[in-house]
Amino acid sequence: MSAISYELGNLVSTTESVARSRRWITSCQLLLLAILFSSPLAFGAVVPAAWGAIAIGASVALMFWAAACVQQRHLFLNYSRSHFVVVAVLLVAALQLATHATADAIGTREALVKLGSNSIILFLTSTLFAIAAESSPRRFGWLISAYSFAIALFAIVQSFASPDRIYWAITPRWGGFIFGPYVNHNHYAGLMEMLFPLTIAFLLSDRVGGPIRFWLAFAAVIEMASVVLSGSRAGIMSIALESGILGAYLLTKKYFPSRRIVVTLVFIAISIGLLYSWLSSDFLAKRLQSALQHPEASYGERRNMASDALVIMRHFPSTGTGLGSFSTVYPQYQSFVTDQQVEHAHNDYAEFLAETGIPGAVILVAALALFGAHVRNNLRQPVLSTADWMRIGATISCLGIMGHSFVDFNLHIPANAAWFAACLGIATTTSATEPLAN
């Protein structure tokens, strides 16, 4: 991670200009939070109006950040080499579009808009998290914990009261396995895979105490329970993986949690055990059986889709078929019979390789290597503040959703992609010495 601090011209910032700069920064932060919190509520922002709103909101937030830099006569950039990977993907897609090397120009333009929006969210999250005042990560932790608890509780209540309708009123036109505000239960699980580690990380920060700590523990239990009740097999495995990584981290780290945190973790473990004992008798088995019998892609079909995607890559090695063109090209290479329309490969990595070819493969390997270096550094560094804990939580969030992406297309759901960009921004952030926002 690198930081650039640069004075804009020879003018000295006045007290008034600094105050205006902080107001612009605050506006940028609030707009980013509005994007992240509202996009899952709009069915994961899969409808054009919703993902278009994300693009517009991200662009406006970038202008707010620019206005803050101009007001304070101070430019601060916090970036890592991982950010250049995103720029490389944008350049590849733009080149595909400019040279007509895409099988679906409309799909590639749409993918460029979505990826551009997420790159802005990545950049702004990384920069704002780095320059934030010490109290900001704590406020962020509270907001994330309350938001994820509310989403999980709503999803559980809706699954019992109205399992076939979203918000008790909306029936998806093409059907689906509804859970929470998502048409697909796997994509709801993908969202929780990113929110759950952030809640646990804030809990471990040891900045709260008393009944509030147990409320956070209860929120974490509800979040995990909602993933189990969703019936998403990959989601359950990803949450278990994240919990295992966090447990291994706590065991191997020289940092030992306080007695209050140990009691809280024991409370979480006992609550999960009691919840499982209550559910496993009959309900959980029926829920998972319902998921297995639901007319969605089976494991064998997902494996075939991934294999077919790699065949497409071999046929288009130099340029790929064009970012966002998979659904257009795939029918020519489909190796199995199904009555479902295949929009995605149910493997984000294989689909990316099919659409970008060898250049995409190089970018993907570089991205995984660079993120692996961030993971190693984050897990090795001492944890001294709430910001450090939130960075650990965001790192585990990214690992969880990246694991799930081997069998699903969570990163093609705009709301989940935006949250992944935000988590990646936090995970690849270092602290700044002079905060701009209070």
Image (tube, rainbow, N blue to C red):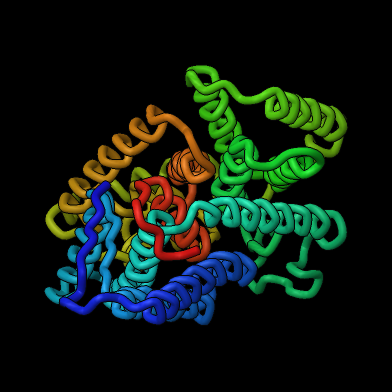
Q: Nearer the viewer, residue 32 or 354?
A: 32
Q: Position of residue 202 (x, y in %)?
A: 60, 43
Whether residue 98 appears in this view of the structure is yes
Q: Nearer the viewer, residue 331 or 305?
A: 305
Residue at point 55% right, 54% down? 135
Say if 224 sits above or below 153 in the image.
above
Q: From the viewer's perspective, is 417 left or right of 210?
A: left
Residue 412: which quarter of the image? bottom left
Residue at point 29% right, 79% down? 70
Say if 247 sits above or below 11 in the image.
above
Whether residue 331 appears in this view of the structure is no
Q: Position of residue 421 (x, y in %)?
A: 42, 57
Say if 117 sits above or below 239 in the image.
below
Residue at point 55% right, 59% down? 339
Q: Nearer the viewer, residue 100 or 128?
A: 128
Residue 277: which quarter of the image? top right
Q: Position of residue 244 (x, y in %)?
A: 56, 26
Q: How many marks?
A: 0
Q: From the viewer's perspective, is 409 left or right of 173?
A: left
Q: From the viewer's perspective, is 352 left or right of 193?
A: left
Residue at point 32% right, 41% down? 371
